[in-house]
Amino acid sequence: MSRGFRVAAGFALALFLSAPAHALTVEPVTSPGGVTAWLVEDHSLKIVSLRLTFRGGSALDPGGKESLANLGSGLLDEGAGDLDSATFHARLEALTASFDAEANPDMFTLSSRVQTEDLDGTVDLLHLALTAPRFDAEPVTRVKNDALAEIAEVDGNPDEIADVLWRKSAFGDHPYGRSWLGSPDSIGRIEPRDLRDFMQQRMARDNVIVGVVGDIAPAALKTLLDKLFAGLPAHAAPDTVPNVVAATSTEVMLSRLPIPQSVAVFGAPGIARKDPDWYAAVLVMHILGGGGFDARLTEEVRVKRGLAYSVDLDLDPMDHAPLILGDVATRNAKVAESIEVIRDQVRRMRDDGPTDAELQAAKTYVTGSFPLDLTSSLRICWLLVTIQRDQLGIDYFDRRNALFEQVTLDQAKRVAKRILDPDKLFFLVVGDPETLPGVKPAPKLE
Amino acid sequence: MPKSAIMLAALIVAALGVGASEAGAQGLAADGFTLANGLEVAVLPDHRAPIVVQMVWYKVGAADETPGKSGIAHFVEHLMFKGTKDMAPGEFAKTVAANGGEENAFTSHDYTAYYITLAADRLPLAMRLEADRMANLVLSDAVVLPEREVIIEERRSRIDNSPQALFDEQIDAALYMNEHYHIPTIGWEGEMHGLTTADATAFYRAWYAPNNAVLVVAGDVKTDQVKALAEKYFGPLPQRPVPDRVRFAEPPKVASTRLAMTSPLAGTASWSRSYLAPSYRLGKTEEAYPLEVLTEILGGSATSRLYRDMVLDKQLALGAGADYDAQMLGLSTFTLFATPKKDKAAEVEAEMDRQIDALIKDGVTQIELDSAKKRLAARRLYAQDSLQGPARMVGETLAIGRTLDDVKAWPERIAAVTVDQVNDAARSVLDNRVAVTGLLLPEPNLEASSPLTRPRATESVQ
């Protein structure tokens, strides 16, 4: 290849920027019963994918009953109506439908992918699961045991330990500081009645967000939606989780564990998804800590010094406490150096901001890579739901490129100063570091 | 590249099975051809989004390494991003990112694969970059030595910090007595420290050639267009002799093996029993499809045999299932596994023995067979609901010397499996006299033994 290569690449780039950013046609569909879903019709495969997200997640678990949302997600396919757990599973399998439920601190999600011919049968099962869950003794005990085992598993996983201790230190008694998986005590306290209350209070028509992709027409979807949500309460219990600012510490916290490589989680308060500076912040964080080889942290920590396999620092916009949060894993002898390099890079980005060339490259990446993810119907469902949840508007697909392209270098520099402070970046280390000056012990766990 | 070379590169089109345009609505649409220099090409048109994924698969993996140089295949994978005669170190990834694309790579025992996903009109760029590093990689200590630290950190993250991963390494080392699958893909740490620039260069020169590679392009493209581009960018690369790939024959196994490990970091006990098994390519290959169906019958779902028996009925385990991957060049592994409840490991093993005995004696039922086949067929359809999935399926298949026909015929070959074939395969493979049984147990002396969990992240749309 000749030196002409780069010129050719630049030329092609300009062509690309003028090309449409997406080929999705999103249609809002509202049922006679008043439920709205966003639909991407696609008949190329005889498959329909659905994603239902209910606002409000494990952060709403009552004090002392942590793990409620988690157990709820595990029990949704364990029997409903006349069908006990075994029969329910057998029906699902006969339909070869996937059925996944998951809670995170801010939301509860149910997703399913099914062949068109089995869609009606699957919707009947989903409807039954949402409106008439049984919570029989055997599956409740079994799913509780699964949760206890998961607790034991993460107890031995340094990445998990570091993340949890960081959140515990940053959020204290706020629901974001406690475990969504709960403890043996809190799991022990949860009864079928609590699970029924959970379904009744958190799964309603006014907090559900629906995305549908695949082999279905709008008219059929309208019928489906009313069938799916028939009998669901009109209103969900209010989201009572207070907003909170993550508390940070200038001192590194250490939880000692006899492993060959230390894991560090580091973070600070970030900015909310609705903040007007969001788009500039995305670009700045991509340049600093995006994790790819175009990111400064990867270049300095991994490429130049061989200190880690991966390092990143990203925006994490939780509903009630937006964060910037990153992690790195480095051999015990060199953890202090990794931390120093990261702080130094955060300082530089705060003081000087990105270069114009970095900003342009980040814009091209962030706009150009957006559609790359949209190659499976479940993933497109995720996008449809998330855009609704974040209230970005159905025209977001058309506006998105411009939102990034209009970010100026001055704005990026200002936003870097606003969100980055090397001295407030709070590091929590799990491992057996050889030298790590100025550490204090991580907080004791419950 | 001189234009004359492009003109000279003749194209040999080998019609492989059903053409993309003729495939049924639910079938996998794929075309295949081979360039004059031996590069195999597969095209999977999918026009659902204006995106393309390009993958280049090299027919070399960790099992092809020279003894004493474990980890070199994976190390070379990392070093492929370190520059060529015309590209500075790191420029490859930056160029892809600046064009709105994503790239990465992965290494297994049998192959090494590189992929770029980007807008469909960017395919020429992806081909140019990938063809360049197929022939022109330039390595020096300045980029190689820091990267050696990176792969060792990767080993610590993936293996050394995880008792289950460490234990699995030991199981493979016990199961394969001669075959190089007994060496972990990432390498033994002691040998990784000694890998040099010269080692990497030698490995690259030996194995990286168009006649030892497979190009897979999936997405919003037409076969003719991919043909023309492949001819232009990869066509001029010269064919070179590459070593024969050897999968060393396993000597007869005459003993069973038991492995035990305790770790303060193991949250729960984990039990497994592993058997050498045929793959699509080696051993009694006719057993491969029946073994895939058997895996589904034993452990594919919440109503499968082992889960029903050990988790739901006997309530001895938190989970139980089976694992098997036929897509290997050498002998594969058939594994039964369970997560025993506290203090139930011995009972789990006794129950698993009963299950194996019953399977050997009574076999599987027609109902089990039909239900497993239906689930496998659905899974295949769902796998087509992505760009990467089918591209990987095709790449893996061709990289171990099979054909596009094999990929397309998979559903009908699974559909043709009979109860007798499944039972024969089970009897042939599940021989406890030559199995490796492993038990990893928690060691409850962790200082921090309180419940710890991390919230699942909220992914934002940016």
Image (spheres, rainbow, N blue to C red):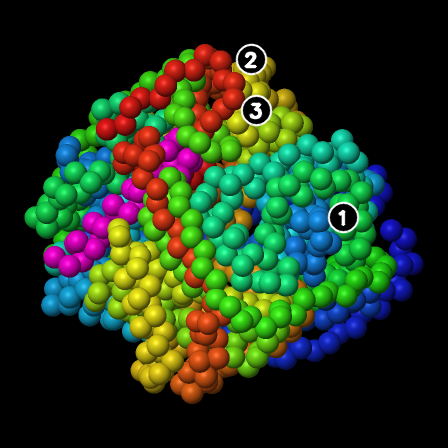
Q: Which residues are magenta?
A: A137-163
Q: Closer to the camera, B239 or A240? A: B239
**Residue at mark 2:** A351
- Where in the figure is residue A256, as x and y percent of width and height? 41, 26
Residue B400 in which image quadrant: bottom right
Q: Marks 1 and 2, Cα distance to the nearest angstrom?
A: 38 Å
What's the chain of the residue with tag 2?
Answer: A
Please indicate whether residue B70 sits to the left or right of residue B202 in the image: left
**Residue at mark 1:** B133
3 and 1 marks in contact (CB < 8 Å)? no
Q: Residue at x 67, y 66 (%)?
A: B247
> Visible in this render: residue B301?
no
Indicate the secondary structure of the residue bearing disc 2: helix
Same-subunit check for callouts 3 and 2: yes
Q: Main secondary structure of the magenta part?
A: helix
- Where in the figure is residue A58, as x and y percent of width and height? 24, 39
**Residue at mark 3:** A334
What's the chain of the residue with tag 3?
Answer: A
Please indicate whether residue A115 sits to the left or right of residue A290 in the image: left
Q: Marks 3 and 2, Cα distance to the nearest angstrom?
A: 26 Å
Camera-side mark, 3 or 1: 3
> Visible in this render: residue A257?
yes
Q: Closer to the camera, B241 or A145? A: A145
* Crowd class of label 3 (few under 14; some 14 to 19; many from 20; radius 10 Å): some
Q: Residue at x 18, y 42 (%)?
A: A187
Q: Marks 3 and 1, Cα distance to the nearest angstrom?
A: 33 Å
- Where in the figure is residue B258, as x and y percent of width and height? 45, 59
